[in-house]
Amino acid sequence: MTATNPRNNLRGALWMIAAMAGFAVEDMFLKAVTRHIPLGQALMIFGLIGTLFFALLARRAKEAALPAAMLSRPLLLRSGFEVTGRIFYSLAIALTPLSTASAILQATPLVVVAGAALLFGEQVGWRRWTAILVGFAGVLIILRPGLEGFTPLSLVTVLGLIGFAGRDLATRAAPLTLSNRQLGVIGMAMLALAGAVILTVTGGATLPDARTLALLAGMTTFGIFAYNALTIAMRTGEVAAVTPFRYTRLVFAMLLGILVFNETPDAFTLLGSALIVGSGLYTLTRARQR
């Protein structure tokens, strides 16, 4: 494979769009299923099925499903941030509008760029720092602290954002010997753990009925598909060419929020989303030019 091949970039972009659509549909199913069973129970079931799926893929590739490297410091940090991100973002999906939670989450790449500069010494010029600040301003516009439309529940999404950004930064320091299948096992296991933590606090586990099982099946199917599509995308084209298409997740999330949950994003959410996406795209473009 030649990463600079335009066809590879096109295929990578299409896989990235498919992945973001899959994640948005997964979020939709998660929001719907929490109306029937506790959030923690839904995450536990999803995480356990996902862990089994990636463990089988690892075994098929003759890899250890639970490698010794998972106990390394970067992987332990990654697992901790994964649990944090999963807990708070899942709570945000269940408790706040899907479009709002997804919009705030789009600032994750900006936090990763800032973290890479502060922690790994990567060069980030004043233009990209300015774009990062504009993106953070977009988050504040969506949150609108101090204004009538402010809801403290929106801060839950920010905590999820920090968790996912920490996970991505820790992944950069993870041993390169780990395959995506092994990282999938660890990630899904942490999802199950996050569900167990939430369920321990809330309690209320129930036996799912046929409708709930169908929703769980949809969430699991689209979640696993999205993870695999994301992996294919990142290995097919250039990272700088493929990554900007992550922002299509916001489009899918807003459409699903409107069509399925009758949400109506207000002017603050749309303006903040535009600032986040615009600054993110500029940051990625600037990085590619450098």
Image (cartoon, rainbow, N blue to C red):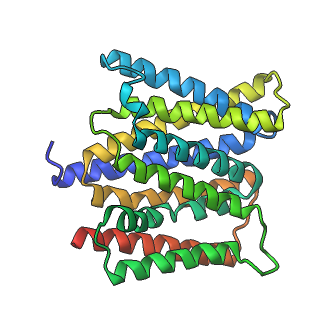
Q: Nearer the viewer, residue 38 or 73?
A: 73
Which residue: 35% across, 83% down?
Answer: 127
Q: Is residue 10 above or below residue 286?
A: above
Quarter of the C terminus within the rendering: bottom left
Q: Is residue 159 above or below residue 218?
A: below
12 displayed left or right of 30: left
95 displayed left or right of 110: right
Whether residue 221 appears in this view of the structure is: no
Within the image, what quadrant is residue 98 found in?
A: bottom right
Residue reaching furthest front? 73
* Residue 145 pos. (x, y %): 73, 77
Labels in figure, total = 0
215 displayed left or right of 10: right
* Residue 228 pos. (x, y %): 41, 36
Q: Nearer the viewer, residue 140 or 245?
A: 140
Which residue: 31% across, 71% down?
Answer: 285
Within the image, what quadrant is residue 33 found in?
A: top right
* Residue 27 pos. (x, y %): 63, 46
Whether residue 135 appears in this view of the structure is: yes
288 displayed left or right of 194: left
Quarter of the N terminus within the rendering: top left
* Residue 45 pos. (x, y %): 65, 27
Which residue: 49% across, 79% down?
Answer: 133
